[in-house]
Amino acid sequence: MRTPKTIRLRSANDLKSNKVEDIKNELRLLYEELDRYLRLLWQDVATIQVDADGFVYFGNKDTDGTWRMGRDGVDWVLEHRESGTWTTVDTAAGS
């Protein structure tokens, strides 16, 4: 897994002016940087599936090493497939 990249947001003091065109240019540059970052983040994921069981799969659901997230009862879970078994990595408890 890659080390997360830090995106530096410029402050208002970094802007050359407050002209609309300069602000639009800054927003365009930020969009391009976010687009590059998200493409790097997702390039390792060949397949994303939403299955009938309500889970979102990152990879083939029948292959070890695949991740999935979704609801388990009232909880939101993140699971990893190891040796043919889904192992819960994290849980956000529902109410």
Image: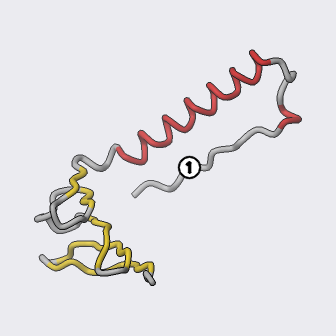
Question: In this rendering, is residue 26 above or below 46?
Answer: above
Q: Is residue 86 left or right of residue 79?
A: left
Q: Single out the residue that lies furthest toward the front.
A: 95
Q: Single out the residue that lies furthest toward the top.
A: 21
Q: Is residue 65 left or right of residue 91?
A: left
Q: Which residue is identified by label 1?
A: 5
Helix, strand or loop under label 1: loop
Identify the image quadrant of residue 30. Answer: top right
Q: Position of residue 90 (x, y in %)?
A: 40, 78
Front residue of this view, candidates 73 and 1: 73
Q: Quadrant of the N terminus?
A: bottom left
Q: Is residue 59 left or right of residue 19?
A: left
Identify the image quadrant of residue 59. Answer: bottom left
- Label 1 CA crowd tier, 10 Å (few <14, some 14–19, many 20+): few
Question: In this rendering, is residue 53 above or below 32?
Answer: below
Q: Is residue 4 left or right of residue 76?
A: right
Front residue of this view, candidates 71 and 6: 71
Residue in the image at 35% along x and 72% along y: 78
Question: In this rendering, is residue 37 above or below 84?
Answer: above
Q: Quadrant of the C terminus?
A: bottom left
Residue in the image at 21% along x and 53% along y: 49
Front residue of this view, candidates 95 and 88: 95
> Total number of numbered labels?
1
Residue in the image at 57% along x and 32% along y: 31
Residue in the image at 31% along x and 48% along y: 44
The amino acid type found where label 1 is placed reads Lys
Question: In this rendering, is residue 27 above or below 63?
Answer: above
